[in-house]
Amino acid sequence: MANKTKPPADYDEIPELTDADFARARPFKEVFPEQFASWKRGRGRPTVETPKMHIGFRLAADVVNGIKATGRGYNARVEKLLRDALAQGKL
């Protein structure tokens, strides 16, 4: 069981929020747009001009197992094979 501690003495001075308080509430990014924008810069993956797309299709189990057996980075190798086949007009 968690060890419960007594709340600070000034905790009772914090009023409970009312429905009116919640009705007046606004998203942080609306109230402080500059600060929100500064937090967003430089976080996560950098944007790219042509992002990769996620697709889904089914392949035979032996094909998938064979591809995965080639080790780490098999996604990039499969992409290269498809690019080469497209360039040669095989697809």
Image (cartoon, rainbow, N blue to C red):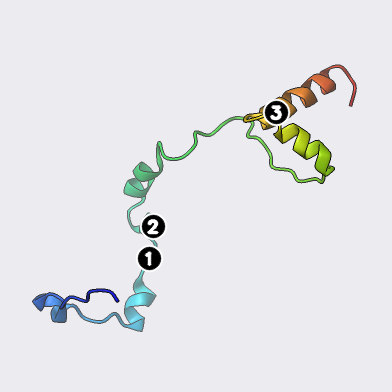
Residues at circles 1 and 2 in contact by the CB criterion of under 8 Å: yes
Real-space Cα separation, disc 1 to disc 2, in angstroms: 7 Å
Rendered-image quadrant of the N terminus: bottom left
Observer-side mark, 3 or 1, equals 3
81 versus 57 height, above or below:
above
Q: Position of residue 20 (x, y in %)?
A: 34, 81
Real-space Cα separation, disc 3 to disc 2, in angstroms: 50 Å
Q: Residue at x 62, y 30 (%)?
A: 72
The residue identified by callout 3 is 70
Q: Residue at x 79, y 19 (%)?
A: 84
The local crowd at label 3, few if under 14, some if 14 to 19, many if 20 or more residues have their Cα within 10 Å, is few
The local crowd at label 2, few if under 14, some if 14 to 19, many if 20 or more residues have their Cα within 10 Å, is few
Real-space Cα separation, disc 3 to disc 1, in angstroms: 52 Å
Amino acid type, label 3: Thr
7 versus 50 height, above or below:
below
Residue extending farthest right? 90
